[in-house]
Amino acid sequence: YDFTDSNGFYKASKGDHIAYRYEIHEVIGRGSFGVVFKAFDWKDNIFLAIKVLKRSSSKLKLKEMEILDYLNRFKTCDSSKMLKYYGSLKFRGHICLKFELLSVSIRQ
């Protein structure tokens, strides 16, 4: 089964799992760089947002890794004004970024 569509986006449906830990409940966003899922973390018993970045060229992957390194600096920041970043993982060739689940889009 191919888990990536022709544009490089990760394909998933409700009930699918990422890394046998995060259960996908719904798609909550889609953009140029990936898809955002509302997911349940079975280890920590919380809902969170997981952005699954689309597969891209090596040059873009290097930029993505720079961004991850930058975000990692704020992982322990405990400010109500900052979106909480829970880390990342690689799954089926895609980089997955884990964030707190907000009730509204940060673009609104």
Image (cartoon, rainbow, N blue to C red):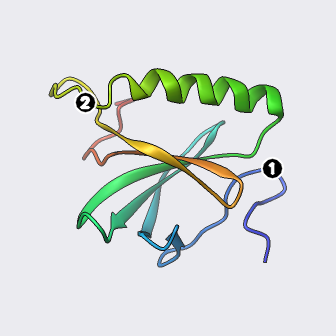
Residue 7 circle label = 1
Tell which of 64 and 37 is nearer to you.
Answer: 64
Amino acid type assigned to the residue bearing label 2 in the image: Thr
Residue that mark 2 sits on: 76
**Label 1 crowding class (10 Å Cα cut-off): few <14, some 14-19, many 20+?**
few
Image location (x, y in percent) of residue 89: 53, 50
Question: What residue do we see at 67% from left, 23% from top?
Answer: 63
Amino acid type assigned to the residue bearing label 1 in the image: Asn
Vertical relation: 81 (above or below) 88: above
Vertical relation: 24 (above or below) 9: below
Q: Quadrant of residue 5?
A: bottom right
Residue 35 located left or right of residue 15 = right
Tell which of 32 and 51 is nearer to you.
Answer: 51
**Sooner in the amino-acid sequence: mark 1 or mark 2:** 1
Can residue 97 be seen in this snapshot? no
Distance from Cα at disc 1 to Cα at disc 2: 34 Å
